[in-house]
Image: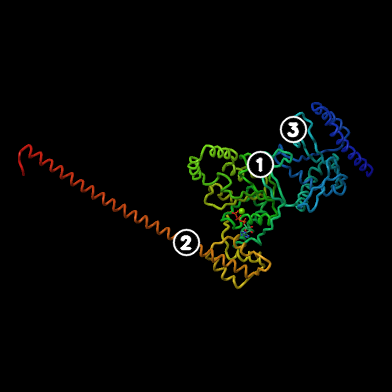
Amino acid sequence: MVMMGEIWSHLGSAMATFMFIYAMVKQFFPYNLQGYLEKYFQKLVSFVYPYVEITFDEFSGERMKRSEVYSAIKSYLSGKSSASAKRLKADSMNNNQSVVLTMDYNEEVTDEYQGAKVWWTASRIISNSQRIAWYPNDDEKKLYRLTVHKRHRELITESYISHVIKEGKEIATRNRQRKLYSNNPSDNWYGYKRSKWSNVAFEHPASFDTLAMDSNLKEEIMNDLIKFINGKDYYARIGKAWKRGYLLYGPPGTGKSTMIAAMANLLDYDVYDLELTAVKDNTELRRLLIDTSNKSIVVIEDIDCSLDLTGQREKKKEKDTNDEKMNPVEKKAKEEEKKDSKVTLSGLLNCIDGLWSACGGERIIVFTTNYVDKLDPALIRRGRMDKHIEMSYCCFDAFKVLAKNYLEIDSHPLFEEIETLLGEIKMTPADVAENLMPKSDYDKEETCFNRLIEALKAAKEEAIKKAEEEARAKAEKEEKEKQQSIKEEKDKEQSAKQDKNDETSAKEVKENGVAAKEVQENGVIH
Ligand SMILES: Nc1ncnc2c1ncn2[C@@H]1O[C@H](COP(=O)(O)OP(=O)(O)OP(=O)(O)O)[C@@H](O)[C@H]1O
Ligand SMILES: [Mg+2]
C-alpha cells in the first residue's frame, strides 16, 4: 500500500512536470496547430494519466474583476511555498517593513489534505497569437493549477478547495496592509500596470477616540458601523445587498474626512477615494466600482462640487446666463470639459443601488458635502444614504476630546469659561485644535487655553460686529423700502389728483364748448 502510494506520488509529480514541459513546448508550435496538438495530447494522457487538474485564473469574467479565489490561493500557498519551493518571489508589505514570499512561476508546491496529496503549480502563459498586443502585459494569463489523483476528486472538490479559500482569506486578513486607493484616468487602465486604482499604505492615525464630536452621536455611529459589519446574515435574510451609505455634511474643518479615516480604522477596511471628475462616463464608473474589494469604504468627497449632480435646474439656469457672458474660446473650452465627464446622476444612482452594487458585499459608501441643501434629494434619500450625519461646530464635548488629544488634560479651571464661550460662538474643531496645539516647547496648557479663549472672544466680537452691521444694513434697507413706498403712495395720490383736475377741466372745456355752440345757434345767453 505504502509502495503504491509512493509510486502514485512519484508518478503524479512526474506527470505534473511532464504537463509543464508540454505547456512550454506547445508555445513553439504554430498557433493554428496548437488546437490539434492539444486534442490528441489530452486523449493520450487520459489513457495513462490517473490525475485530475483544476485551474484557477487570475481574472474572472472577461478580465472585469480580479478573482478573489486566485488571491486566496496565493495567500494560502505563500506559507507552504516559503517552506518547500526553491524559487520564490518576494513582495514588500506593510510599507516596505516586511516581505511576503510566494512561489515563482513554473514552481511546484505539494500539500496534503486528509491523506490526499495535491500538487500546486503557478503558471504564466503568454499567448503566441498573431494578434497585435498594444501593451506588454495584454496577452499574459496567470493561473494556479491543482493536480490530484482521480480517487480524491470528491474530497478535493467538495472540501479541500473551500478549506484553501477559507484559510487563504484568513491569512490575507492577518497579513493585510490596509490601503488607500485613488482612481486612475482610464487612459492608464490598459497600460503596463493595467490597473484602475493606484494605492498607497493607509496609515491615518484618526480613531473614534480622537474624534471630537458630541459623545452620544459618536456612540450611535460606532454602534451603527459595528451592527453593519456583523450583519451578513441579517442582510441576507431581508434580501438586501450588504452595503450601507453615509452622508457626512457640515462646514469645512468639522472633521468629515477625519471621520472617514476613523471609520476605516474601526472596521479595518480599505478606502477607495473616488474622484468623480476623472471618470469619463457611467460605464467607467461601473468598472471602477466592480474593481473595488470587499471590506472597503468608497468615498466621494465634496459631492456637490464633483459633478453636475446637484440642484440641477437652478444650476442650469445660472449656467445658461453665465454661458451667454462667455467669449467663444471660453465656451469651447467649457464644452470640451463637459464632454470629458459624462457621469450622470442616474448613472451614479445605478452604481450605488442598482444590480451592479450587489457584485460584492461589505461595502460602505460615504459622500461628503459642505452644502447638503444643494444636493438632489434622489441622491441622498434613505436606502441610498442610510444615515445622514451632521458634522457641526465644536461643542464642549468635542472640546474636551481635543484638550485630551492635544494637551492630555481632562479638566482645568478655564474649562468653565471655554464652555460658556463655545455655547455662544461657532468655531470649527479644526480652529479649536489649531489654538490648542502648543506653538513651542515652553507653551503650557494654560497658554493654549488662554489663546483659545482670546480667539473665541475675538470671534465673538467679530460676530457681534457682523450682526450689528447686518442689522444696520437690514434697517437701512427697510427704511429705504419704507421711503420708497411712501414716495410711491404720494406719487399715486398726486397722479390721482392730477387725473381728477384734468377730468374737471376737460368737463369745463366741454361745457363751455356746448354753451358757445348754443349762443352761436340760438343767439341766446343764459
Ligand atoms: N471633529 C474633529 N475631531 C478631531 N479633529 C478634527 C475634527 N474636525 C477637524 N479636525 C482637525 O482639523 C483638520 C481638518 O479636518 P477635516 O479635514 O476632517 O475637515 P473636513 O470637514 O473634511 O473639511 P472639508 O469640508 O474642508 O473637507 C483635521 O486634520 C483634524 O486635525
Ligand atoms: Mg474633507
Tell me: residue 267, above or below residue 194. Answer: below
Q: CA distance from mark 2 to mark 1?
A: 47 Å
Instruction: Classify mark 1: residues with Cα within 10 Å, few (<14), some (14-19) or many (20+).
Output: some
Q: CA distance from mark 3 to mark 2?
A: 68 Å
Tell me where residue 361 appears, x and y as whole percent. 67, 48
Of residues 462 and 369, which is closer to you in this image?
A: 462
First reached walking from the N terminus: tag 1 or tag 3: 3
Q: Nearer the viewer, mark 3 or mark 2?
A: 2
Q: Is residue 123 visible?
A: yes
Q: What residue is shown with label 1?
A: 185
Q: CA distance from mark 1 to mark 3?
A: 21 Å
Label 2, secondary structure: give it: helix
Instruction: Classify mark 3: residues with Cα within 10 Å, few (<14), some (14-19) or many (20+).
Output: few
- Three-letter amino acid code at disc 2? Ala
Tell me how many marks there are: 3
First reached walking from the N terminus: tag 3 or tag 2: 3
- Give the quarter of the image for residue 12: top right
Instruction: Classify mark 2: residues with Cα within 10 Å, few (<14), some (14-19) or many (20+).
Output: few
Tell me where residue 264 appears, x and y as whole percent. 67, 54
